[in-house]
Image: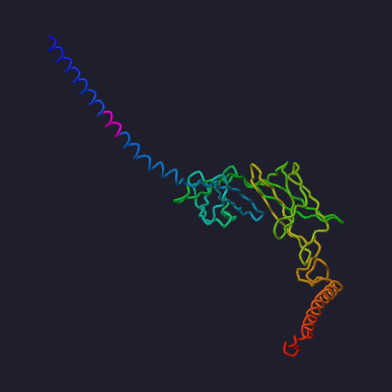
Amino acid sequence: MNHISIIKSFKTFFHQLVATVVTLVVFGFSSALFAQTDSSKSPVAAVKNESPLITPAIQFISVQKGDSTIDLKTKLTSKVKGAFIKLPFLKLTFLQVTDTADKVMGLVITDREGKAVFNVKANAVVPDKEGKLHYKVTFAGNKAMETAEEELTIKRAMIILTPIKADSLLSVQAKLVDVGTGTLIAVPEAALGLFVKRLFTSLKVGEGTTDINGEATIEIPLNLPGDDKGKITLQARLDENELYGNLETSVVQQWGIPVSVVQQKFPRSLWSTQPPLWMLITFIVLITVVWGHYIVIIFELFRLRKEQPKDLPIKSIL
C-alpha cells in the first residue's frame, strides 16, 4: 500500500510539473508576440516625435480701395518651440468662393517677411445677391509643413472724399456708403481716420464719426509740408470693421507747404559734417602745439647725444 501511494503521488507531481511547464511556455510565447507587435509600432511613433510637421497660420485681411479694386493681404507664420517665425517664399492660392464652386483667381509667393498681396481688379469684383464677397486663401503644404487655409467675408462699400476750402480753413468731407446692392446706402456711426501719406508711414491728422447721412467732416492743419509744389496726398480709412473689413481712398490737394527735394548745402554747425571755422582753427592750433612739443623734445635728445664727450683711451691717460 505504501508503495502504491508513493507511485500515485509521484504521477500527480509529474502531471502538475508538466502542466506548469506548458503554461509557462504558452505565456512566454504570447508575451513575445505582444512585444513584437509593440516594437513594430514604436519606430513609427519615434519618427513622428522626432520630426513633427510645422503647422502654419494665415492672417487674412482685405482692403477695399477707392478705385473699386480690393487688396487681399496675407501673412504666413508658424509657432515653433514657443516662438513665432515667418514663412517666406511659399506659394499661396487665392480663390473666390461662390455658391457653385471655388474659382481660382491667382497665385502669389510670400516675400521675406512671409507677406503676400493679391489685387482683385474692379471687373473681377462680383458680389452675391446680398452684396457680399467671399474669398479664400490656401497653402498646399509640403514635406515639412501641413496644409492651411483661411476665409473672409466682406460687404462691398466705399469712401467718397470731397475737399472743402472755406476762407482760411481746410477740411475734407468723407462719406461712407454701402454699394453691395448696386445703390448707394449711407453707413452711419462708423469711425473714419484721415491721414497724410508720407515716405515710410502715413501721418494721422484727424478722425470723425459718420452721421445719419454717412458723412464726417475733418479739418486739416495748415502747416503740413508737401512736395516741391505743395501737394499732399490725403487718405481716409475705415479700419477693421466687422461688416466691411478695411477701406481706404485718397485724394491729392495742393494744400501743403512747398518743400524742395533738391539737396542743399547745409551751413557750418556743430551737428553737420562741416564744423564752424573757429572750431576747426582752434583744433588745428592745439594739435600743432602738442606735436610741436614732441618734435622739439626728440630734436633735443638727438642733439645731446651728438654733444656727449667720447671716452679717452687708457694709454693716453697713463
Whole-percent x and y of residue 200?
A: 70, 59
Q: Nearest the camera: 57 or 219?
A: 57
Q: Main secondary structure of the magenta part?
A: helix
| Residue at the bottom extreme of this rendering | 316
Residue that appears at 57% across and 43% down: 129
**33 with respect to 228 (left or right):** left
How did the renderer colour the structure?
Answer: rainbow
Question: In the figure, is residue 186 to the left or right of 44?
Answer: right
- Does residue 209 appear anywhere in the picture? yes
The picture places residue 10, in percent across and down from the top left corner, at 17, 17
Q: Quadrant of residue 307?
A: bottom right
Q: Where is residue 223 shown, x and y percent of the image?
A: 83, 58
Residue at figure coordinates x 51%, y 55% from the top left: 90
Identify which residue is drawn at 80% across, 81% down: 300
Above or below residue 73? Residue 317 is: below
Query: In the picture shown, does residue 179 fall above or below 293?
Result: above
Quadrant position of the C terminus in the picture: bottom right
Q: Which residues are magenta?
A: 26-32
Tell me where residue 187 appears, x and y as whole percent: 70, 43
- 246 relative position to 108: left or right: right
Quarter of the image that includes the N terminus = top left
Q: Is residue 27 magenta?
A: yes
* Residue 218 in magenta stretch: no
Q: Nearer the viewer, residue 78 or 188?
A: 78
Q: Residue at x 73, y 41 (%)?
A: 189
Residue 211, quarter of picture? top right
